[in-house]
Image (cartoon, grey):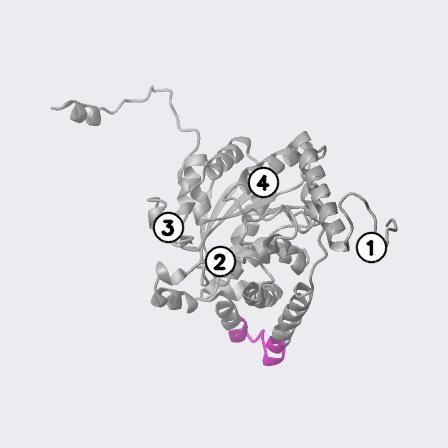
């Protein structure tokens, strides 16, 4: 027998007193994504919830198409569309209480708007005009996170701090499947479970991390299975079933608020549009795959249920569409106005007390701006005199 074979055959026996800290069985996710729409459970869904979800999804879809158009017009620098993922976005926002916190990724503008953030302010970062664009404390929405998964440890820290203070607060952190390959994902889930922090992790598995398919990121049976290794329950849900996502997230939020600790939820969905307006998705996936997912559209699934139960007539459907169009028209009109920007804002709200380097950079930029203004007005730099020699 070779040395490697001997090593492979060695199986150490744990001491008799060893016992697993947690029974893994209750933590394991279902083998199939949980669904409500199209099943018998749909008959018990609250009609008002169905209508609310539908109206928000239609509005969200129109927001996506309008924002994508704004990138083509040069009014946005970039826009990561969430078309096809609206059920995850809206359900996440509606599962939270007003006192809770949402920690979004860069693709989660719909969830941010659904929490009450102004639609234009939600796009300010993607326009390149401001660090965030909205007041996180006003709406309890953390800044949109462009680096992958860095918002997850922040969510755990806030949730843990709230628990230590005795505040009845839950944090819900959103991340894509690509973000689960980052170290921040591991660290956040590990500390959340150790501390039993009141935080819910929502992984929107849309099939691709830009152009990298899920099969090249992980060999796990599902991303929800990763929860077991950290000691928290994993839930697997159909991410295009808005009612199912809302139910699973609401259960996880209640569990966290009641002291049950964190939950990892994987919502299986699909990114219908390209990664961003700068991406050519045809280079790594075919039209047939996209069309298959279009037939599982979250809005169509919900409208079918509402229509079958007689909860959505043509007048009501038209009112929902008109409301979405009004939102899009307002967004378009406001985004088409040139913003009044102050370059000195680059240095605002970076640190409570500016560092020496920031103060030096701020002084250099101010001097450059003043010199440019003098040159434009026809003055000699540093004189402050106008064309006729008068002081300004």
Distance, label 2 to label 3, CA atoms, is: 18 Å
Circle 1: is it few (<14), some (14-19), or many (20+) Cα within 10 Å? Answer: few
Pair 4/1: label in front: 1
Q: Is residue 69 left or right of residue 210?
A: right
Numbered label attached to residue 214: 3
CB under 8 Å between discs 4 and 1: no
Question: What residue span does the magenta drawing correspond to?
Answer: 306-318
Q: Secondary structure at mark 4?
A: helix
Pair 1/2: label in front: 1
Distance, label 4 to label 3, CA atoms, is: 25 Å
Q: Which residue is mark 4?
A: 155
Pair 2/3: label in front: 2
Q: Which residue is mark 2?
A: 276
Who is closer to the viewer here, 226 or 134? 134
Q: Earlier in the sequence, mark 4 or mark 3?
A: 4
The vertical placement of 64 against 23, above or below, is below
Report the residue that reaches farthest toward the bottom. Answer: 314
Q: Which residue is mark 1?
A: 387
The vertical placement of 233 against 6, above or below, is below
Image point 65% across, 32% down: which residue? Answer: 357
């Amino acid at each position: 027998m070779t040395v490697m074979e001997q090593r492979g055959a060695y199986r150490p026996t744990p001491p008799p007193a060893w016992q697993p800290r947690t029974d893994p069985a209750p933590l394991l996710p279902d083998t199939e994504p949980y669904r409500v729409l199209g099943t018998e459970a749909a008959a018990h869904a609250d009609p008002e919830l169905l209508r609310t979800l539908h109206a928000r999804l239609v509005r969200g879809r129109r927001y996506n198409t309008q924002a994508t158009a704004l990138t083509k017009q040069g009014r946005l620098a970039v826009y990561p569309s969430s078309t096809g993922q609206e059920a995850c976005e809206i359900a996440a926002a509606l599962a939270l209480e007003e006192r809770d916190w949402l920690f979004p990724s860069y693709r989660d503008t719909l969830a941010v708007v659904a929490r009450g953030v102004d639609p234009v302010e939600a796009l300010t970062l993607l326009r390149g005009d401001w660090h965030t664009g909205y007041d996180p404390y006003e709406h309890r929405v953390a800044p949109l996170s462009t680096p992958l998964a860095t918002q997850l440890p922040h969510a755990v820290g806030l949730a843990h701090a709230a628990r230590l203070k005795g505040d009845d607060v839950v944090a819900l952190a959103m991340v894509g499947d690509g973000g689960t390959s980052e170290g921040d994902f591991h660290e956040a889930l590990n500390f959340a479970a150790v501390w039993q922090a009141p935080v819910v992790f929502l992984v929107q598995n849309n099939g691709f991390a830009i152009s990298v398919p899920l099969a090249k990121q992980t060999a796990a049976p599902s991303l929800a299975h990763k929860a077991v290794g950290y000691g928290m329950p994993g839930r697997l849900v159909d991410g295009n079933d808005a009612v199912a996502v809302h139910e699973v997230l609401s259960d996880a939020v209640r569990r966290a608020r009641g002291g049950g600790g964190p939950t990892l939820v994987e919502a299986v969905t699909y990114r219908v549009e390209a990664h961003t307006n700068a991406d050519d998705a045809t280079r790594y996936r075919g039209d047939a795959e996209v069309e298959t997912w279009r037939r599982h559209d979250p809005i169509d699934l919900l409208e079918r249920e509402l229509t079958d139960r007689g909860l959505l007539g043509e007048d009501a459907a038209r009112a929902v569409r008109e409301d979405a169009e009004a939102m899009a028209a307002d967004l378009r009109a406001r985004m088409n106005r040139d913003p009044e920007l102050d370059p000195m804002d680059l240095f605002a709200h970076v640190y409570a007390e500016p560092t020496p380097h920031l103060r030096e950079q701020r002084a250099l930029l101010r001097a450059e701006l003043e010199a440019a203004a003098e040159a434009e007005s026809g003055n000699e730099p540093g004189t402050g005199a106008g064309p006729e020699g008068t002081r300004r």
